[in-house]
Amino acid sequence: MSKALTILGSTGTIGDSTLKVLSLHPDKFSLFALTAYSNCEKMFQQCVVWEPEYAVMVEEKAADALERKVKKAGLKVQVIWGLAGLEYVASHPNTDYVMAGIVGAAGLLPNLAAAQAGKRVMLANKESLVMSGQLFMNAVEENGAQLLPIDSEHNAIFQCLPSIKKKGEGSTTKGVKKIILTASGGPFREKTLKQLERVTPNEACAHPNWVMGQKISVDSASMMNKGLEVIEACWLFNVKCSDVQVVIHPESIIHSMVEYADGSIISQMGNPDMRTPIAYSLLWPERGESGVGSLDLFSVKQLNFEEPDLLRFPCLKLAQDAIRTGGTAPAVLNAANEVAVAAFLNAQIKFTDIPHIVESALSSHSVKEADTIDLILSVDQETRQEVGSKIKTI
Ligand code: NAD
Ligand code: MG
């Protein structure tokens, strides 16, 4: 039977790739809702092609403009707006699957609404899990939702693990010795600390292997992305931070690996293209077309591996320390990083200021138990305000 899908963040790069995969499987999926922040023109184009039941714009003005265009074109799309609109479509009884493709903390409430409504949640938005790990995993478990990772590394690990977590089973990790999380090293892998002080937003966004939104591109360049992914892996696979080893693999061909107690290492490989993990999660437990071509091993020729350099890329260590500390520390790490990245993209701070800002936010925070979403959201807001005022003084 055909499954109805909601794409949160349909105008982003994850949204684009998801629509490309959907177009290969018209008999298997229908589009229930699309959502975006403010890009009315792109949303309108998507409505023309896909005619979903709902289109949600976070900004009211963008929603008004979209509604006029949709009416004029005679499309049967209901336009709604605001955060409540995101949660409404993410948890609506007529949607089966939800692609969590919003960037940043803004994804938390709609993703949680999808989990609480027992949907298949395809998680690209790692920030929501970093912020609310235990509460998010509880919501998935208690409401019979399915949480399938879209992040290429976690999707790879999911593919390499022995079985999925079943209700009450506790862990997916029987016989697993460790998880090996690969990282491309980003565009600045070979730069010295001195050179890193002068890199520009454009250079940071020019990732060697992946086409991505600006925020995750900067995170990849600082290796905060890998730090967020370590935290994501701890929650998704119920492992300790010390069981997740980060390995630089500049070719981005091996998307991650699982090492077993008997010495076996199982890896998942393929061309670096998000359509593979997206197709895997949409079609799971079956497999089918993603539109991604075969990997040409003869042109790849060799695969390289290096240890990460925590002196040049301290964000990775800050994230590892934050998950070890636990409680509200990862939410502070995430909020401080989001504000710092936005300031770097606006040319307000240097690239090398990002880890200092995050570190200072973490050291001035008194960690609490992250036991309610309200508390996590207020820690997120407080951190944003504090970091925002600090940046003004730089
Ligand atoms: P993007 O910037 O290209 O797109 C972001 C989407 O979120 C857009 O549709 C935008 O309208 C929407 N959005 C932005 N701010 C919003 C807000 N405040 N409220 C509601 N919607 C908002 O980002 P992306 O590269 O597609 O990444 C999306 C998420 O997927 C991120 O969490 C990222 O870490 C994760 N991810 C992306 C990739 C990738 O290859 N792009 C890979 C792994 C994980
Ligand atoms: Mg990733």
Image (cartoon, rainbow, N blue to C red):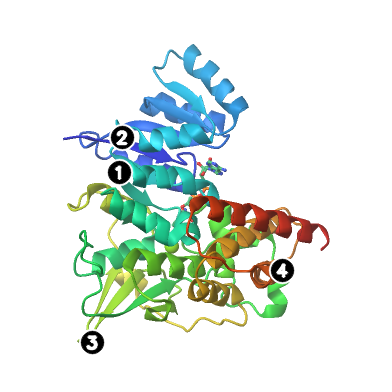
Q: Is residue 165 above or below residue 17?
A: below
Q: Quadrant of the N terminus?
A: top left
Tag 4–tag 3 contact (CB < 8 Å): no
First of labels 4, 3 by sequence position: 3
Three-letter amino acid code at disc 4?
Answer: Asp
Q: Nearer the viewer, mark 3 or mark 1?
A: 1
Q: Nearer the viewer, mark 1 or mark 4?
A: 1
Q: Residue at x 58, y 21 (%)?
A: 65
- Would residue 146 be seen by someone viewing this image from the given angle? no
Three-letter amino acid code at disc 2?
Answer: Thr
Q: Residue at x 52, y 19 (%)?
A: 67
Residue identified by numbered label 4: 353
Of residues 59 and 372, the one drawn nearer to the viewer in this rendering: 372
Q: CA distance from mark 3 to mark 1?
A: 36 Å
Q: Is residue 135 above or below residue 177?
A: above
First of labels 1, 4 by sequence position: 1
Q: Is residue 211 above or below residue 170?
A: above
Give the number of the disc on residue 119: 1
First of labels 2, 4 by sequence position: 2
Q: CA distance from mark 2 to mark 4?
A: 42 Å
Give the number of the disc on residue 263: 3
Image coordinates of residue 280 in percent, x first then y, are: 26, 53
Tag 1–tag 4 contact (CB < 8 Å): no
> Residue at the right extreme?
393
